[in-house]
Image: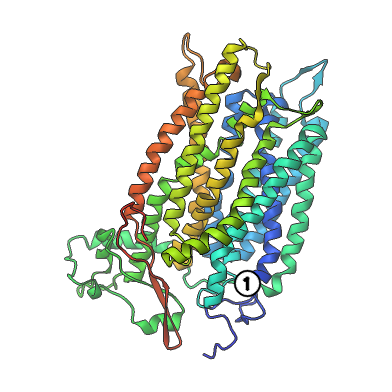
Amino acid sequence: METKGFTQDGTVDLRGRPVLASRTGKWNACAFLVGYEAFERMAFYGIASNLVNYLTTQLHEDTVSSVRNVNSWSGSVWITPILGAYIADTYLGRFWTFTVSSLIYVMGMIMLTTAVSLKSLKPTCSNGICNKATTSQVAFFYISLYTIALGAGGTKPNISTFGADQFDDFNPHEKELKVSFFNWWMFSSFLGALFATLGLVYIQENLGWGLGYGVPTVGLLVSLLVFYLGTPIYRHKVRKTKSPARDLIQVPVTAFKNRKLQLPQNPCQLHEHEPQYYINSGKRQVHYTPIFRFLDKAAVKDGNSGRPPCTVTQVEGTKLVLGMMLIWLVTLVPSTIWAQINTLFVKQGTTMDRSLGSSFQIPAASLGSFVTLSMLISVPMYDRYFVPFMRRKTGNPRGITLLQRLGIGFVIQVIAIAIAYAVEVRRMHVIRVHQITGPKQIVPMNIFWLLPQYVLLGIADVFNAIGLLEFFYDQSPEDMQSLGTTFFTSGIGIGNFLNSFLVTMVDKLTDRGQHKSWIGDNLNDSHLDYYYGFLLVISTLNLGAFIWASSKYVYKRETKEVNEGCIEMESKALEISPLGLQV
């Protein structure tokens, strides 16, 4: 087939027709997508950053319950993408899954804005005494929140991968552009988060919660209109497999059935299609790797069996998912550390001196804007200076490997939680000196003492959050890249659930007899420093686990035949570096 002028990766338009490389995709198409991402992040962080305060001041929940509920909702927002990605990869495709889910998301935002605006849906107060929220008020509020979580399930894993689809891996120039895509994609996300933590949080606490939620709702609607304006120039990946996740079941089952068969000495003797198959089908061939060898038996040729064995490419796809699961497990604790930003860090800030001038009070949740600011400054520096410098040193197009990037981020995060622990020890010392015991007494310690931990977590996120998103997209099997991206989102979700579990268990275990709870309603009479110390210990141990897991990981190596040439898509050395992070 003559492919001159068309994309080489087989992408098509919305009607299934081949697209011209010069008129579609690339940053021209992504420009229509980044606006949505900015407004969606503004909406999410506009809720998440200050939700713990809304629950305690408006719905009158206690500290532990509010932290648990914030984590449960945040966790759901990051877990539901598993369902959205499966639907996209198996049935609807990324564009249509995103379309349906974005409408659900907007509906949830409208419901939430209504819940915080109408007096009948909020608890009433009289003479400074507020009634508890009724069952119907609480139910409508949480139905609104979880409608947003359901909508996020279809938008979150598909909009970023749809953006990455706009770059042709077989075009050297576009492949180079794609290296920067995830950095600048997250940059737009950070812009939305910055406006939320600086502007929306202030609006919510000073001008009204209805206006604070109404602004991002309108912005989200406008960004969707902009997104659909770009429809003519979008590229769409063609599904080459009806059920991409089927291999994850078929390969282990076949390997178990063949467990008594002998593996050949040479891996080349395992079952694999001829190169012509990959030329005709447009699929990519994944090369053999010597890990998880028990799965290789699924590709053993057995002349007595009536059913053909799995191919090496199918087996390697399953190996990739197992390898990513190993890395995924060691991202859960870092996600738990990240969950502190919108929960305990905020509650901690409310106890401190937030005065700026004679009359202005900084909203405690606004300090989260420094996480975003440090990201916004760090992303261009990383992309424009760090990557070119390291590229000259290592010869790697990314500057450093994906796992090395994650490792640096995790180290910075350990330093951040160590500083958070030290600052809380200092706050407890000031409390003892001034004999502060009341829950609403302000500790004479400026809130900007918390600034270093926020800034460092922002810098860490440039390495580990963006690195994880790129890692799971890049290393996923070809037909499972939306589902693969959910490794990133689900890790954050499980991290939130894990934090909710830890907070609940620590509160129950420490609040016994004469002992004070580490995380009580009165943070001035608790031991939050002990909890931060506990997080420091487990994050340090987790860093060691990450170094071990990365030493076992082997990067994907795949090729695709294009016309008469063989293009190597990914080629990484299998040797292990002294640090355990592959070069």
Q: Is residue 253 above or below residue 76?
A: below
Q: Is residue 243 visible?
A: no
Which residue corresponds to the image point at 62% horizontal and 48% vertical from the top-left? 150
Residue 137 lies in quadrant: top right
Q: Residue furthest bottom?
A: 2
- The residue lying toward the viewer, choosing from 60 and 571, is 571
Residue 304 lies in quadrant: bottom left
Q: Is residue 141 above or below residue 42?
A: above
Which residue corresponds to the image point at 36% horizontal and 52% vertical from the top-left? 550
Which residue corresponds to the image point at 66% horizontal and 19% vertical from the top-left? 444
Could you tell whether 353 is left or right of 172 in the image? right
Q: Is residue 51 above or below residue 257?
A: above
Residue position for label 1? 26
Image location (x, y in percent) of residue 245: 44, 61
Image location (x, y in percent) of residue 292: 28, 58
- The residue lying toward the viewer, choosing from 80 and 28, is 28
